[in-house]
Amino acid sequence: MKFASIFPTIRRSWLLVILMITALTVTACNPANFRTAAAQVPQLVIAVLGEPSTFNPALNESAYSVFGFIYDSLMTTNPFTTKLEPALAESWEVTNNGQRIVITLRPGLKWSDGQPMTADDIVFTYKDIYLNPKVPTPTKDALKIGESGKLPTVKKLDERRVEFTVPEPFAPFLRLVGGIEILPAHILQKSTQTKGSDGNLQFLSMWTTGTNLKEIVGNGPYVMESYIPSQRVIFRRNPYYWRKDAQGKPQPYIERIVYQIIESTENQLISFRSGQLDDLEVAPEGFSLLKQEEKRAKFKIYNGGPDTGTTFISFNLSKAKNSKGEPSVDPIKSRWFNKKEFRQAIAYALDRETMKTNAFRGLGELQNSFVYVKSPFYLPPEKGLKVYNHDPEKAKKLLLQAGFKYNSANQLVDADGNQVRFTLLTNAERKVRGDMAAQIRRDLAKLGIRVDLQILSFNAYLDKLKVAQTWDCYLGGFAGGGIEPHGASNIWRINGASHTFNQAPQPGQSGITGWEAADWEKQIDLLYIKGAQEVDENKRKQYYYEYQRIASEQLPFIHLVERLNLQAVRDRFTGVKYSALGGPFWNLYELKVTD
């Protein structure tokens, strides 16, 4: 499954996309009951493949979250023009070569509990949370500036204006500040100043999924009304939301959102076909069937082209040991995984065209870079991006050159005679992932490599990757890459919270020994710094081009196939303006229900 890079290049398209692009569909406990009970109010029933891990946006690392419904951002990015547009912020002014930004809030903004939202909330959000060294928020990775990792400063000018300053030019800063959730000081400030019995700030245990929903305050179009774990979240319209239409009528028009948790694309398809869902992320295995029903069942399948996310396998390159002196990876396997030739051989061995045809039913595109193919920063193969087309003979040649050999049983072994065998980890919710994993095992068996599969639920999968860190290789992805490469800084910066292939010790971790970064990781880290420092887009491209050249040579991520962005939406909704960057609901506030 996909977990998110932290930079919301499109607030609607990054938060709602992360919510809905990752799994829009429905029901485990007959949502028809909700339609009957709430037939008198306009509502939207959608679904997600996994349940939220937290209701605290500053601590969230999962792709499955509620925040696109309950929070707005200061600015939003139009998914068609990619230009920034006002949201909570009425306007902004950028001066001093981009190092000073003054943001002016709209007048009369309120939190969902009716309290005023002011510049104090913005200052609190940054100073006490995102810039606080005691708060391990993944957002902090994107806010670090330059080689020194300095952070921006923020101060209040008056009730509606704040000033951000950065110590040096930082090209992504406006989009970054524009997309981060602002949190309520009147609710959370005390928790950032008080420690619990464990010695940590109380904020770190605030707004868990067990919190009384009345205590959770937002500034977005909806508030949470109820949550039943593993079943659903129900949202109702926020009466204090700021948007109004041209006639002065409050938005959004849709009164209620039913957000079903259905941890299987196959079950989501069944729910949509039975009329229980209003929207469905169309998985490859369901497309041909749904296409035949499109007119009769009164829905439309939108095709946004290649999805904005990434899908890959990645080997665990960490040489670190935990506090008990236990290695994250078996040292024998670690020596294989850390050989560039081994990773390249694996890439050549994978038949991605067959994977596209079989696992994706032809509804995908081969992927070769972490940067979205429609981004101006994408490096095409003709400019130096290395591409690994299926070539088993080249794969074998690379392995032999790297010191591997074949035994009498035609099994691949290393120079010491150890059979090359590892476990591939992935998540269970998407059928296509299981199909991909099965083909990877077959393709590598032809090289004499034995692959064992470990398929877990998303949260268990994420825990093994991010907490235990005891894995060999995983099949996964990151959602919503978007236009701006800096969005992946938490993945590519050496100390980033999602630098999964060689995770550095994170704040709060102790006793980790032996961790080290390779020279090429350090090169990419520096290129990310320089790319953010450069304000001229053409010059920025050269830094991101070079990072992609290194990444395609070193292969910390072996790219596979990315699905086409296909979504089925019921005809009863008007105002849908679909794009891969925005999804079907980036303009949720202006959608209407016709029946």
Image (cartoon, rainbow, N blue to C red):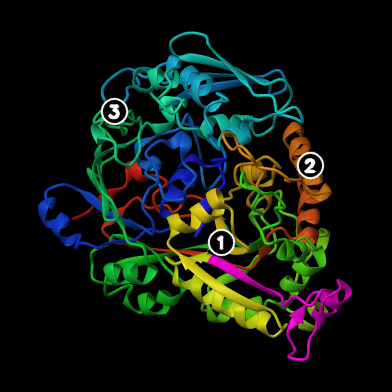
Q: Position of residue 427 (x, y in %)?
A: 48, 64
Left-right relation of 90 to 496: left
| Residue bearing the label numbered 1 | 476
Instruction: Estimate how packed mark 2 is, as few (under 14), some (14 to 19) or many (20 or more) residues with alpha carbons within 10 Å.
Output: many
Q: Position of residue 589 (x, y in %)?
A: 33, 41
Relative vertical location of residue 419 with respect to residue 373 in this rendering, above or below: below
Q: Which of the labelled discs sits on residue 433, or is there none? A: none
Which residue is at 26% across, 36% downward?
Answer: 213
Q: CA distance from mark 2 to mark 3?
A: 42 Å
Residue type indicated by callout 3: Ser
* Image-based side of 382 in relation to 350, left or right: right
Q: Which residue is mark 2?
A: 527
Q: Specify whether 250 is left or right of 129.
A: left
Q: Residue at x 39, y 44 (%)?
A: 587
Could you tell me which quadrant the C terminus lies in?
Answer: bottom left
Which residue range is magenta in the image?
A: 396-425
- At x 42%, y 65%, the residue is 429
Horizontal and vertical percent for residue 244?
31, 31
* Magenta stretch: includes residue 556: no
Kind of residue at disc 2 = Leu
Q: Nearer the viewer, mark 1 or mark 3?
A: 1
Residue 258 makes an appearance in the image? no
Q: Which label number is shown at residue 112?
A: 3
Upstream in sequence: badge 2 or badge 3: 3
Question: What is the three-letter code of the residue carrying label 1?
Answer: Gly
